[in-house]
Image (spheres, rainbow, N blue to C red):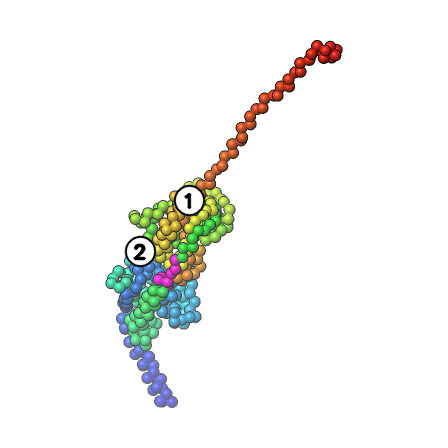
Amino acid sequence: MRILKYLFLLLLLSFVALSIFVATQKGDFIVERSQIINSPKSTIYSFVNDYRNWEDFSSWIIEDPEMQITYPKKTIGPGATFSWQGKDGTGDMLTVFVKENDSISQKMNYNGTSSSIFWSFKDTIGGTKVTWKTTGKMSFTMKVYTTFKGGINKIIGKTYEKSLANLDKTLDFEINTFAVKVNGLAKKLGTFYLRQTITSEISKVIKNAQIVFPKIIAFCDKNSIELNGKPFIIYHTYDSVNGLTKLSFCVPIKNQILTSSGSDILTGKLEAFDAVKTTLTGHYSHKKEALDKTLKYINDNKIEISPVFSHIENFTISRTEIKNPSKWVTEIYYPLKPKVTPVTTFTPAIIKKQEAVKTPTPVLNKEEEQSEF
C-alpha cells in the first residue's frame, strides 16, 4: 500500500509539475510558411478566396475523410464563413478583409484557440509566391496538445506546408486542364429573361457575375418566378484593347413579367438566332483563347457577324453545379448577320382591250328589198 501511495504521489507531482510547466509556456504564437505556386496570382487568389475550394487543398480536411463541413450561402469575400467538425476537434473561419489579387485576412477559432490568418500573393520568377501566416494565443488545452506534438510551430507549419503543396498540385491540374472546341454553325434558342446591365472591366466580369447572378436568382425565388435554364451574359460591346465591356447578366425565365419602376432588375426577351458556337470546357481564365479561336473560324470562313451585340456566354456547367474548374462548361455564341431574302414582286400582265367586231350590213338589191316586205 505504501508503495502505491508513493507512486500516486509521484504521478500527482508529475502532473502538477507538467501543468505548471504548460501553463507558464508562452501562449502567443506566430507561424508562417511560403511556397512558389505555378499559377497566375489572380487565379490562386480567387481559388483561396472561396471556402468551398478548401476541401481540395487543406491537409487537415483531406486527412480526415469523416469530417463534417458546413457551408453557408456566402463562401466568397468579406463576411464569408465555413465551419467543420472532425476527429481532432471543431473550428470555424471568417473572412474579414480582402484586397483583390493581393491578400486575404481571416479569423479562425479552433478548439477554443483564436487566431488571425493572413494570405499574401506576390508575382515572382516561376509563378506566384503564396505566404500563409497565422498569429494567435493558445488556450491551455492547445498548450497541452502542442507540448506532446513538438510545439505549435511544427504542428501548424507542417499542415501549411502540406496544404500549400496540395494547392499547387490542385491548381496545376484544375486550372490548366481545359479544351476549346469550335462547334460551328448552330441555333441559339430564344427566351424571356431578367437582367442587370452594367459597364465593367473585362477582368472583373466573373467577380461581378458572382455578385449579380445570386441577386437575380434570389429575386426569382422571392417572387416565385420559374427559371428556364442556366444564367448567361450578353456582351453588348467588347473592347479588348481597353479592357472594357457593356454587358447584361441574364437569368432565363419561363414567362414574361413586368418589374416595378426604378428596379435595377429589368426584363428582356432574347429572340432565337443563328450563331457560331464554341464550347469551352475548363476554367474561365481560358476564355480569351476560346474567343480568339472563334473569331479565327469566323474570319477563315468569311462569316458575317451581326452588329446587334458582340456575343453571348452561357454557363452550362458552373461552380454552382461542380467545384472542379476543369469540368466547367461555357458555351459562346456569336450572332450571324441575318440573310437578306430577295422579295419577288408580281407584275400582272397587261391585258389589251379588244375592239368590238363590226358585222357588215348586207346590201340588198331592189328585188330583195321588195321581198322583205
Tag 2 secondary structure: loop
Identify the residue shown where x is 40% and y is 66%: 84
The part of the chain drawn in magenta is 174-180
Vertical relation: 259 (above or below) 88: above
Q: Which mark is drawn over residue 337?
A: 1
Horizontal side, residue 194 vs residue 164: left or right: right
**Can residue 229 be spotted in the picture?**
yes
Question: Hey, which quadrant is residue 74 in on the image?
Answer: bottom left
Q: Residues within 10 Å of mark 2 (few under 14, many from 20)?
A: some
* Residue drawn at (28%, 76%) of the image: 21
Picture coordinates of residue 159, whole percent (x, y): 33, 70
Residue 370: within the magenta?
Answer: no
Identify the image quadrant of the C terminus: top right
Is residue 212 visible to us here? no
Toward the viewer: 147 or 73?
73
Give amino acid for label 2: Glu
The amino acid type, in three-letter code, at marker 1 is Lys
Badge 1: few (under 14), some or many (20 or more) residues near its Cα, within 10 Å?
Answer: some
Q: CA distance from mark 1 to mark 2?
A: 39 Å
* Residue 176 is covered by the magenta coloring: yes
Residue mark closest to the camera, 1 vs 2: 1
The vertical placement of 360 against 80, above or below, is above
Q: What residue does disc 2 label?
A: 100
Residue in front for this viewpoint, 24 or 335 = 335
